[in-house]
Image (cartoon, rainbow, N blue to C red):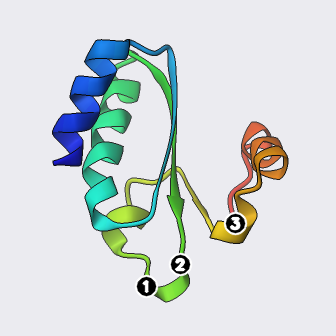
Amino acid sequence: GKGEATRRLIDDVRPRAILALGDDRTDAAGFRVIRSLRDSGAVAALVVGVSGGTETPPAVREPADLLEGPHRIQPALFLRRISKGTRD
């Protein structure tokens, strides 16, 4: 699944920082891997759940650091918001 694929990719690339965005249950496994690595100090990371309103599954909302609607993920605006640490 995406969790194992995420771990393999991170092991291969060895990034210092990760920005992950996802919108469905399959993304949640990758989110958990990234958060675990961040919590252990192995990587800096931000996990963003892309919210589709009420249909956004709890599996995406719970491991996300931020929840954003798809219309809010415009590069300049989005980066400005995450740099300020705001959460809607």
| Residue 51 against residue 1 in the figure, above or below | below
Would you name the residue on which mark 3 appears?
88
Say left or right for 65 vs 60.
right
Report whether 15 appears left or right of 10.
right
Q: Earlier in the sequence, mark 3 or mark 1?
A: 1
Residue lying at the far bottom of the rendered structure: 54
| Residue type highlighted by circle 2 | Gly
- Left or right: residue 31 compared with residue 75: left
SS for dot 3 = loop
Q: Quadrant of the C terminus?
A: bottom right
Marks 1/2: CA distance?
6 Å
Q: Which residue is mark 1?
A: 55
Q: Are marks 1 and 2 in contact (CB under 8 Å)?
A: yes
Marks 3 & 1, CB-CB < 8 Å contact: no
Reading the image, the residue beneath label 2 is 52
Specify few, some or many for label 1: CA neighbours under 10 Å numbering under 14, 14-19, or 20 or more: few
Say which element carries label 1. Answer: helix
